[in-house]
């Protein structure tokens, strides 16, 4: 009788355990607690909410900004580069168009017996600021290790600078002109070896500045995958989730913010970098349009990737672009071209 009672207790325990387990299965009607959402799917495009591929905080801040901001909020020193590699300085420079004081950051290589360095002014993508460049593994550190001074900034309404966002229009272009002249006047910079480099939508601020200020001491201009005009910038006039662009029919707004309009009157050599799969656009037509306008315009030398200079191309039969399989990071790719361009265009 004792054994029968024990067996009955075991059976009842198993039944109760099974009932509790079934009651907690999804769909059983019981609250199973918070469910983990699937992460955003990467499309390897700027704007897909995934920071991957060639994207980083300077060329696609809308996807990569949270990572950059998180590091700053966590208290990490985003200005630090190894003391043996670079010296870092901060400045404030007034934008004459707005009166706002721009935050400007300068990274200088620590190299013995070097008096003057070549320098790069870097323009971020989207409506980004200087934070992505200033990260320990960012472009400023990479370029310093290669022997270049880099000058980065926060335009009006961005980062550490007050004022209103101008979406790379004339006010931002006026401020960038001041930054370029400031860079040329730095005591450690060889003003004959100063270049302008822009990423993505930074092309608009860069080309507008060079077009409107043709006497700036820029040796050459390098553009990575910048949109040509309003339809590229807005992905065929689709509202942007993070940037409040004006509608495409606002001609007054866009007349100050289309690189295709500005590039034809730029007075310095122009280098375009374009990969097979653009980080935003569905094709490479915008790159070919920029090349066509610049070859037909004022730039004295124009080149797409490492193809023959001063050539135009049929959008229906585009040339091969930089392959997606290229193992170089965006910083390394930029640096390779920068080194070549300084050799091609600098006259000792």
Image (cartoon, rainbow, N blue to C red):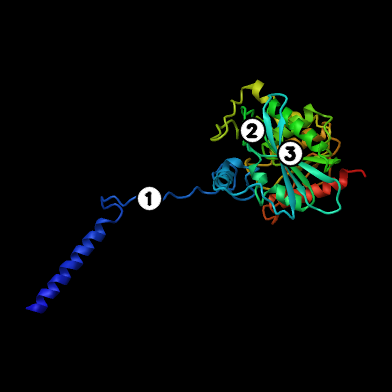
Which residue is located at x 26 percent, y 53 percent? Answer: 28
Quick one: SS at disc 1? Answer: loop
Marks 2/3: CA–CA distance: 35 Å
Q: Is residue 155 left or right of residue 16?
A: right
Considering only vertical position in the picture, is 118 above or below 172? below
Q: Earlier in the sequence, mark 2 or mark 3?
A: 2
Q: Residues within 10 Å of mark 2 (few under 14, many from 20)?
A: some
Q: Which mark is residue 161?
A: 2
Horizontally, residue 20 falls left or right of residue 172, namely left
Q: Secondary structure at mark 3?
A: helix
User: Residue furthest toward the top?
Assistant: 252
Residue ID for mark 1: 35
- Please tell me which of labels 1 and 2 falls first in the chain: 1
**Figure quadrant of residue 279:** top right
Q: Which mark is residue 288?
A: 3
Q: Residue 75 appears at what percent x and percent y? A: 57, 48
Q: How many marks?
A: 3
Front-most of residues 223 and 322: 223
Q: Is residue 306 visible?
A: no
- Rendered view: 72 above or below 297: below
Q: Secondary structure at mark 2?
A: loop
């Amino acid at each position: 009788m004792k054994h029968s009672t024990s067996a009955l207790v075991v059976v009842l325990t198993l039944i109760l355990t099974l009932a509790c387990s079934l009651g907690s299965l999804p769909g059983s009607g019981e609250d199973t607690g918070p469910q983990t959402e699937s992460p955003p799917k990467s499309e390897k495009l700027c704007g897909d909410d995934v920071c991957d591929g060639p994207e980083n905080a300077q060329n696609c801040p809308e996807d990569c900004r949270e990572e950059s901001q998180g590091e700053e909020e966590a208290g990490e020193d985003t200005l630090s580069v190894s003391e043996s590699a670079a010296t870092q300085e901060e400045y404030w420079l007034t934008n004459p168009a707005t009166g706002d004081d721009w935050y400007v950051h300068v990274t200088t290589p620590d190299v013995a017996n070097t008096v003057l360095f070549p320098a790069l002014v870097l323009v971020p993508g989207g409506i980004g600021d200087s934070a992505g460049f200033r990260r320990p593994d960012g472009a400023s550190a990479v370029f310093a290790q290669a022997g270049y001074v880099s000058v980065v900034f926060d335009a009006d309404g961005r980062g550490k600078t007050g004022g209103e966002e101008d979406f790379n229009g004339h006010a931002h272009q006026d401020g960038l002109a001041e930054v370029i002249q400031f860079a040329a006047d730095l005591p450690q910079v060889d003003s004959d070896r100063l270049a302008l480099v822009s990423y993505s939508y930074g092309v608009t601020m860069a080309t507008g500045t060079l077009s409107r200020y043709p006497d700036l001491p820029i040796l050459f201009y390098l553009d990575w995958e910048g949109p040509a005009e309003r339809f590229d910038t807005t992905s065929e006039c689709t509202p942007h989730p993070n940037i409040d662009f004006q509608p495409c029919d606002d001609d007054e707004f866009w007349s100050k913010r289309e690189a295709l309009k500005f590039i034809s009157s730029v007075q310095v050599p122009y280098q375009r970098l374009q990969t097979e799969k653009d980080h935003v656009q569905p094709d490479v037509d915008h790159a070919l349009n920029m090349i066509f306008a610049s070859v037909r315009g004022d730039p004295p030398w124009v080149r797409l990737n490492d193809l023959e200079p001063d050539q135009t191309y049929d959008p229906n039969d585009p040339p091969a672009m930089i392959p997606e399989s290229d193992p170089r990071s965006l910083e390394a790719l930029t640096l390779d071209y920068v080194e070549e361009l300084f050799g091609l265009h600098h006259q000792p």
